Amino acid sequence: KAGVTQTPRYLIKTRGQQVTLSCSPISGHRSVSWYQQTPGQGLQFLFEYFSETQRNKGNFPGRFSGRQFSNSRSEMNVSTLELGDSALYLCASSLVGQGAYEQYFGPGTRLTVT
Amino acid sequence: QQPVQSPQAVILREGEDAVINCSSSKALYSVHWYRQKHGEAPVFLMILLKGGEQKGHEKISASFNEKKQQSSLYLTASQLSYSGTYFCGTDFTDKLIFGTGTRLQVFP
């Protein structure tokens, strides 16, 4: 069974631009969660989507948004990029939800904002 | 509320044991443990559910004290492959929040 895929793997953007990251979950998984990982901060929860609806949201500004499509693929968008948005963005899929089920992480998208 | 992990870093020789702790200020429904090797994605190790059920790795054990809102991960007879950063994730209201991680290094 194919794992979680994320595209692109690397991105370099300029401050003020916007970016869209994509995540394809494992087939049959309906929940997709997004995390931001920076050194020293661990895995910061952004949001979780389930059946095209945002089910949970972390403490990030409104510049961070996402959506999920009917095939469970998910996209994350960051508008008006800031230098502090440079991070590894990970998505994870699970069968039903992140609460009581294991999550499978993708390889991540490394975003660098200059 | 982000759970607090301790210690922040551990250095071991092969064959030694280690305990990683995770504590939360809020009541928990479950605790999740993941390991991330350098340059790789986090990998699931274990879930401990309220009520005592555990799902996960056969060679790694963990405890979940609901009253104290704490969990401990026990790594016995450590192997080189155990090296990595261990994250606990605490769940209440179906929202999984991860700690800042414990870096474990095992040397021969």
Image (cartoon, coloured by chain):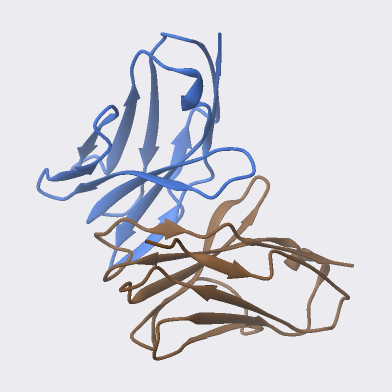
Chain colours: A brown, B blue
Q: Count all numbered tags in the image, as a single digit.
A: 0
Residue B91 placement (x, y as % from top left): 31, 58
Seen at 54% across and 50% down, the residue is: B41
Picture quarter containing residue A29? bottom left
Left/right placement of residue A28 relative to residue A67 reads left
Vertically, is A21 above or below B83?
below
Query: Relative to the observer, which residue lies in front, B35 or A80?
Result: B35
Vertically, is A70 above or below B27?
below
Quarter that holds the C terminus of chain A:
bottom right
Res. B50 in view: yes
Picture quarter containing residue A43? bottom right
Quarter that holds the N terminus of chain A:
bottom left
Left/right placement of residue A4 relative to residue A96 reads right
Residue B99 placement (x, y as % from top left): 48, 47
Query: Relative to the observer, which residue lies in front, B90 or B41?
Result: B41
Residue B23 placement (x, y as % from top left): 36, 41
Seen at 38% across and 32% down, the residue is: B21
Seen at 15% across and 50% down, the residue is: B50
